[in-house]
Image (tube, rainbow, N blue to C red):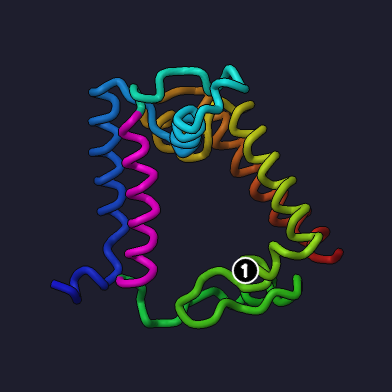
Amino acid sequence: MIDFISQAWHWSVSGVMIVVVMFFLKFLGQRFGISTSFQTMCSLGGAGRFVDYFKYDWKTQDWLIVFVIGSILGGFIASNFLASPEPVQLAQTTLSDLGALGVAAPTGSYLNPMELFSWEVLTTAKGIILFIVGGFLIGFGTRWAGGCTSGHAIAGLSNLQLPSLVAVIGFFIGGLVVTHLLYPLIFSL
């Protein structure tokens, strides 16, 4: 049983589970998305006293609290107990591109490069600025687009919503622009 759990599952398992979850959410009239979870958590914390956007009955979305806790626990369990002992396999072109930016290849089973994702980076002036600006842009973009990537790409597209298709196309274009134009500028500083 443990060998089955620790082996990589076929991608279709995730696809089927997303379909099942989306069916039940649609059937129950609920919304799905990480930004919706964030809105619920902020409302629960009392942010509605300061910002009208968070002023609603969070108890109608209380299942999202379980979703957030499950996501955190699931990530912890997966990374600590179900992680593959094999090193992460990256394409040589990816390694070359990272090296050109001054980022060493991830080591072992750890996917994120330490030059980008570590507490030490967060304590630098550049790291703090990127963290604040990135957080603002994500929050602004999510609010402006009427939802986050998971909300539009999973829930919106499964409901055949045209605004979600436009948003997802915009997310991909934005990702390409950041990867190919902004990352080289940021890492050259």
Secondary structure, magenta segment, majority class: helix
- Say which residue appears at 58% left-offset and 37% top-offset: 169
- In the picture shown, does residue 74 fall above or below 28? below
Q: What SS does tag 1 mark?
A: loop
Which residue matches tag 1? 118
- 10 Å neighbourhood of mark 1: few (<14), some, or many (≥20)? few
- Say which residue appears at 26% left-offset and 72% top-offset: 7
Number of marks in the image?
1
> In x, y percent, where is residue 83?
36, 73
For badge 1, the amino acid type reads Ser
Left or right of 36 on screen, residue 96:
right
* Magenta stretch bounds: 62-81
- In the picture shown, does residue 60 fall above or below 155? above
* Residue 152 seen from this side: no
- 64 or 18, which is in the foreground? 64
Q: Quadrant of the N terminus?
A: bottom left
> In x, y percent, where is residue 114?
62, 73
Residue 40: say if magenta.
no
* Residue 167 seen from this side: yes
> In x, y percent, where is residue 20?
23, 38
Q: Quadrant of the C terminus?
A: bottom right
